[in-house]
Amino acid sequence: MANIREIAEAAQVSVTTVSRVLNGHPYVSEEKRRRVEEAMKLAGYSPNSNAVHLATGRTGMIGVVLPFNHHPYFHALLGGLMEEALKHQYTALLCQTNYDPREERRYLHMLRTKQVDGLILCSHELPWSDIALYAASGPIVACESVQHEQISSVYTNHYDAFLRGMRYLIGRGHRKIGYCIGRRNSESSRQRYAAYADALREINQPLQPTWIFEGCVHLSDGIRVLDSVAAMADRPTALLVTGDEAAAGVLTRARQLGISIPEQLAIVGFDNQPISEALRLTTIDQHLHEIGVQAFQAFYNDMVDPEAVSRKMEIPYELVERSSV
Amino acid sequence: MANIREIAEAAQVSVTTVSRVLNGHPYVSEEKRRRVEEAMKLAGYSPNSNAVHLATGRTGMIGVVLPFNHHPYFHALLGGLMEEALKHQYTALLCQTNYDPREERRYLHMLRTKQVDGLILCSHELPWSDIALYAASGPIVACESVQHEQISSVYTNHYDAFLRGMRYLIGRGHRKIGYCIGRRNSESSRQRYAAYADALREINQPLQPTWIFEGCVHLSDGIRVLDSVAAMADRPTALLVTGDEAAAGVLTRARQLGISIPEQLAIVGFDNQPISEALRLTTIDQHLHEIGVQAFQAFYNDMVDPEAVSRKMEIPYELVERSSV
DNA sequence: TTGAAAGCGCTAACAG
DNA sequence: CTGTTAGCGCTTTCAA
């Protein structure tokens, strides 16, 4: 209701001084600071964000674009991201797309209109060439490997990580290996397929299409997969499951059906999520929390120094051995 | 990058004229409109939202506060809400609290700082007396029954709805009835308990505490409940489950275990969510979509006419008979 | 330490 | 139909 001028009058100081105490600037006498604070409290004053944003040219808000957020994968990523954002007085605006390109574009547009200072994309539908056009309005960071010069990128090398998983299983004597992924058309899925095919080639095994499962995101998807596997005449002896949530579904369902893990079916999960620890699931940790942290830092760097070259940062993964292999 | 003045210069018109075409106002000659549009396209111009918001005193954004949004309950509510918001050129800012009162307060504060024009609370941790203090900064609408003069309220009469469910089951001959709720401490849970106790009193049945289940939100919770029930020596013959998602869990798990529905166990769900249709689940529809629509309208009314008295609107529920009873 | 004053980019009377 | 002009509320030189 009240504005900065009224506070200044009430406290018998200039608006500049009020602004100074508002922003914790030095060079304000204790006496005046006290008076200003009192006046603000008395008036129940809160500064108008829109005015602040207009005057400063920044909003202290970063848009985090993701398809949905009800998944441990995004929790881990967001955890790191927000932790880091907080350190720099930034707050995250959740931009949920539900895989709708129009929604995605709406959020990209917010960069143009200065509603957010930058964008971190945890997922995307639009082509990068399209997205890059918005980079002129503010930093854009992708949580996957992107070549574009204007887009920073913090990512896992999914080919390597998947190959590591395959070789680990192969090293344990497995030849009949299947795998589960989330969406088919993502870049990471392509990389995983390539690693899978290459690994099989190394051991001269044929590629068995029925052992590849798509759409594995939630626990229930893992249950579905295990049921399919159980019904097969020729079953794989090991499964690489991208996402511990789904892997947990596979594992619990298997136990339910009396299929012993790892003897009859070995499982390697991904992400080292809390549930994998609880279930003693062997998993490949891609350090999502760290990806979140680095993604924010990449944004922040671009923000502070717009001239800087966009970062391309590969985050190392790690195999966590437990008892599902 | 460019601002409205530069566009005006480029198009050889005044800034007012540019503003007019920007906002689709009448009284602009076709000739000038064309010139302005061309200049905007050429410059890749987008208006600065913060300036617009500051000048107009509104943001066209409404904050929707909820604990999490990965549940059909909130989908339905949000669906109606956003549909209505769209009609009035409003966009919803999802404010996820994870049941953390500090987060909630942060969102309430956004009303003070004019980051949003109003707030719709689908859930809350802070006491209403506390929340009401923020109502001076903009309309606040609750999706539950609230007495506070400054807070509009769009709600289901949970006591009546629950009683309706109980009497329906009783009418079908049931005497041993249990129920499942989400959180224990919500107002709706208290109402439900009251209706439950009253209904049992009507038929002179003792209240059996072990037949009351809390924390039933997801499908998995329903599974858990059914497993508990199956293990009981003295089982209820019917269950009132607030939330079709959980009810679906109860139902599928029961079938899995060979417990026949409705013969050995009758189930009444709540919300008439898509899954209940698929499973032929009898359910009480509280018209969540409509609650969302009305909640936005309540906000919009308060917005347009700040003098108006806050609305208290009870939305009728409806029993949808299918085959689980 | 302090304050006057010039913006930030846009809207909306008001006067033609 | 069009333009002038005074804000919206805050930050930030700049000079004192």
Image (spheres, coloured by chain):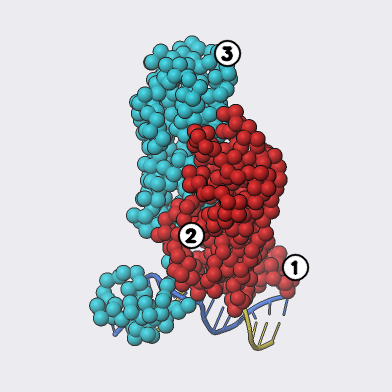
Chain colours: A cyan, B red, C yellow, D blue
Q: Position of residue A230 (x, y in %)?
A: 55, 19
Q: Earlier in the sequence, mark 2 or mark 1?
A: 1
Instruction: Residue B287: name its quadrant.
Output: bottom right
Amino acid type assigned to the residue bearing label 2 in the image: His
Q: Quickly name the residue at label 1.
A: B30
Q: Which residue in the rendered view is the most extreme toward the right?
A: B30
- Frontmost of labels 3 and 2 is 2
Q: In the picture, which quadrant includes the C terminus of chain A?
A: top left
* Extreme-front residue of the structure: B204
Q: Are marks 2 and 1 in contact (CB under 8 Å)?
A: no
Residue at the spot 34% in from the left edge and 86% down from the top edge: A12
Q: Pointer 2: what residue?
A: B124
Residue A305 appears at what percent x and percent y? 38, 54
Residue located at (45% from left, 40% from top): A72
Snapshot quadrant of residue A280: top left
C-alpha separation, residue under disc 1 versus residue under disc 3: 72 Å
**In front of the other: A96 or A321:** A321
